[in-house]
Amino acid sequence: MVLAKGAMGEEPAYPHLELLEKGTDWFDEIFRLDSVRNYQIGLSGGAENVSYNLSVGFFQ
């Protein structure tokens, strides 16, 4: 529709489309095949009056 207005002699809504960058290819971003790494380690314990829980994670 935008390009059609320019072809019909009307002022197009976006007259300088060539200045816009390509942008983000969302289909490629969503469906690309890539490896994912997720590392988790946890430690917990305790005694009668105290308890502890330590957890560390890394996601790449």
Image (cartoon, helix red, strand yellow):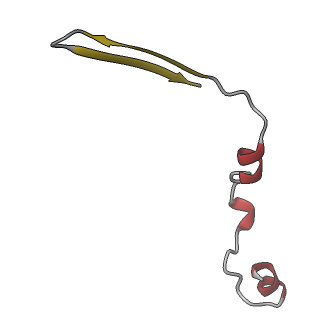
The residue most toward the front is: 48
* Above or below, 43 relative to 11: above
Residue at image location 67% in from the left, 80% down from the top: 13
Badge count? 0
The residue most toward the top is: 47
| The N terminus lies in quadrant | bottom right
> Is 11 displayed left or right of 45 in the figure?
right
| The C terminus lies in quadrant | top right
For residue 59, what is the image quadrant? top right
> Is 43 displayed left or right of 23 in the figure?
left
Which of the pair 20/56 is nearer the observer? Answer: 56
For residue 12, what is the image quadrant? bottom right
What x and y, as percent, mark residue 15?
Answer: 70, 74
Which of the pair 45/41 is nearer the observer? Answer: 45
The residue most toward the left is: 49
Residue at image location 23% in from the left, 9% down from the top: 47
> Is 6 displayed left or right of 45 in the figure?
right
Which of the pair 14/35 is nearer the observer? Answer: 35
Which of the pair 18/24 is nearer the observer? Answer: 24
Residue at image location 77% in from the left, 86% down from the top: 5
* Above or below, 34 relative to 26: above
What x and y, as percent, mark residue 6?
Answer: 78, 83
What x and y, as percent, mark residue 32?
Answer: 77, 40
